[in-house]
Amino acid sequence: MASVTSDNRGLRLATRYAVLVLVGFVFLFPLVFMVVSSLKPDQQLLADTSSIRAFLPVGDISLDNYVKAFERAPIGRFMMNSVFVTVVTVGASILLCSLAAFSFVFLEWKGRNILLTVIVATLIIPFETIAVPLLLFVSKLPWIGLDGLEIGWLNTYRVQIIPWMVDALTIFLFVQFFKDLPRELIEAARVEGASWLLIYRKIVMPLSGPVIATAAILKSLTMYNNQYLWPLIVVQDEAHRPVMVGLGYFFQLQIAWGEVMAYLTLISVPVIAFYLVLQRAFISSIASTGVKG
Amino acid sequence: MKLTKTLLGALAASTALAGAAAAQTEMKLWYHGAGNDVESGLLNTVIEEFNSAQSDYSVVVESFPQQSYNESVVASALAGNLPCILDVDGPVMPNWAWAGYLQPLPISQEAIEGHLDSTIGRYDDEIYSVGLWDAAVALYARQSTLDELGLRTPTLEEPWSKDELMAALDAAKASGNYDYALDLGTAWTGEWYPYAFSPFMQSFGGDIVDRSTYASADGVINSDEAIEFGEWWQSLFEEGYAPGTSQDPADRDVGFIEGKYAFSWNGNWAAAATLDAGVDDVVFLPAPDFGTGPKIGAGSWQFGVSSACETPEGAAAFVEHALQDKYMAAFSDGIGLIPGTKEAAQMTVKYADGGPLAVFFDLSEKQALVRPVTPGYVVAAKVFEKALADIANGADVADTLDAAADEIEKDIESNQGYGH
């Protein structure tokens, strides 16, 4: 009887792993296809798409597509632009959104629930609906820089950073996480005479690693992977162009698919590396905030 | 002493050069060719030679990816940030002129003498843009295929009729040698549909809009002739002559070369690659005549002057400089497009008389019909594309074209007739 139960458990476990491996492959295949295709000449790449060879590094394999991709577009510049914009925006977003959430959760002030509801409600507004008004707004904004007063933010890093520093989703994530922190800790610190800023710095943020990781990953994915329309309309010079707009360099009349795959492989490296570093904290936070990525 | 004189001379020369550079008025040029190093190199040569050939103006180029170029220009127009010289796609030009992004191009008549008509962007009785080249579409086939199937080789003077085309497709299908008889390129979306397929409709006698007024589409895109075209179009997919809208893009790129298709409806830009791939007996056949004469699409990228430009005469001087035969020939040799003049074509390797692609120049000259010259084209083109995709996928032809007519009418109405 015991061996039957053990066999059943083994079978269930094997089935579960088989399903997980299958699902894993489904998610992995596009990445494998991308990397493998980046090593093949176009003719072979296109011919292989109808067979399993599409996922195998077989045939005429070389790094030629990478060499040509670097010749076609200033990839280093595009990646540097995207990484810079992403890092600064994510850093500012975590600071500003956590401060806002701290205020909503721990400070007593009139109208905070209504304001939080309004902020969260903005999640349903698609960016496309505000893109043009925002474009008109930033094109007339003043800025005091090293060259003195300037009018208009177009063709700058700041126009790609500042409008994205605060967003409803990140505030919501922090609010949900802060609500689950033990109130006793905060109250004890208040009794000891700690200021709100000190509590934020010394108690709340050090306990918020998982949500910071989650917010950083979600925000960085938005900034690095999904920033297309906004930089397209506010950046007209190559010097400030991000990676997603740069992808357009590879779509000529005759599309060089091998170079497209090489470019995509290269620009995926920072995203995958960032996720691998933070994945444990990310999963932990997803579990604790109840947010599904 | 000699050294002092040399230094003074050098100083004087550099001061004079700096003075000349400072006196030049800078004109920004936006171009759609980012990522195409051959095209960018050629354009840079044109600009450098213009800048050094005169002392009044200096052109500075900023290149954009083609796929997002129009959006960048429209956004910049909204933000009041347009450059002086704009690169504009032929069929889009009327919309930009109507929207106030472009001003008429003050170019001399001599500068465009002898140019292919389709390279000159006219709207509202004014010239707004001029291009260095055009593109053309032909029916790719192998001479060996025509011979094996016992088909007459059509010529510009005597193209295939609709019946001859269908007989050719039947013969190819019956041979069993091909996955499909005809590759229309349905894997390509966007402007390819109106550019490549609306001439079929026009040859049947229909059109996207009424070209006599540009104020209406009803009775044109859903006319009896247009419905006849729609039914023919649908039959190509229903009866298995051509792959449908789910065609694999890889097959579109290499299917004809690999022998999967007997015929392929494709542009001159793919001709060199086909020859290079070893299809030595490829022939580029003219569009069939479906009743009102054979027609192909026309109008490619052209230079225009933005409404923000304070030196339109300088911009026109640059365009006139760029229109030299030697540049048109260089662009043609570099990126494979059809030079804007016969003289330039003779300077090229492929388009000169007897060259492997010379037929494309003749096609442009004799069969080209520009897409409807109206600001509403940008919307009508998308409506047309959707209608053709729906019909290819089995939608009722008359209902679909009626709905397309309604949609285009509504757009014209909501834009107060686009000024027509």
Image (cartoon, coloured by chain):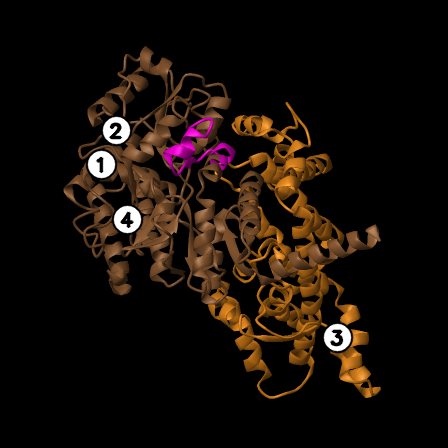
Query: Does residue B103 appear to the left or right of A52 in the view shown?
Result: left
Q: Is residue B246 magenta?
A: no
Q: Amino acid at mark 2?
A: Pro
Q: Does dot 4 land on a helix, a strand or a loop? A: loop
Task: Return the x and y of residue A156 as percentages of the image width and height.
Answer: 62, 64
| Quarter of the figure with residue B419 | bottom left
Report which residue position mark 4 lands on: B372
Task: Check if mark 2's residue and mark 4's residue have beta carbons within 8 Å.
Answer: no
Query: Does residue B179 appear to the left or right of B15 in the view shown?
Result: left
Report which residue position mark 3 lands on: A182
Chain letter behind tag 1:
B
Chain letter behind tag 3:
A
Bounds of the magenta segment: B330-351
Q: Amino acid at mark 3?
A: Pro
Task: Check if mark 2's residue and mark 3's residue have beta carbons within 8 Å.
Answer: no
Task: Return the x and y of residue B164 as percentages of the image width and height.
Answer: 22, 22
Taking the spot 47% from the left edge, 26% from the top edge, the residue there is B349
Q: Is residue B45 above or below residue B145?
A: below
The mark nearer the N terminus, 1 or 4, is: 1
Which mark, residue B238? Answer: none
Chain letter behind tag 2:
B
Tell me the shade of chain B. brown
Chain letter behind tag 4:
B
> Which residue is the extreme one toward the front?
B1
Task: Check if mark 1's residue and mark 2's residue have beta carbons within 8 Å.
Answer: yes
| Discs 1 and 2 lie in a common subunit | yes
Q: Is residue B248 above or below residue B415?
A: above
Which mark, residue B203? Answer: 1
The residues tagged by marks 4 and 3 sit, at their Cα atoms, a distance apart of 69 Å
Give whichever of A101, B348 is nearer the camera: B348
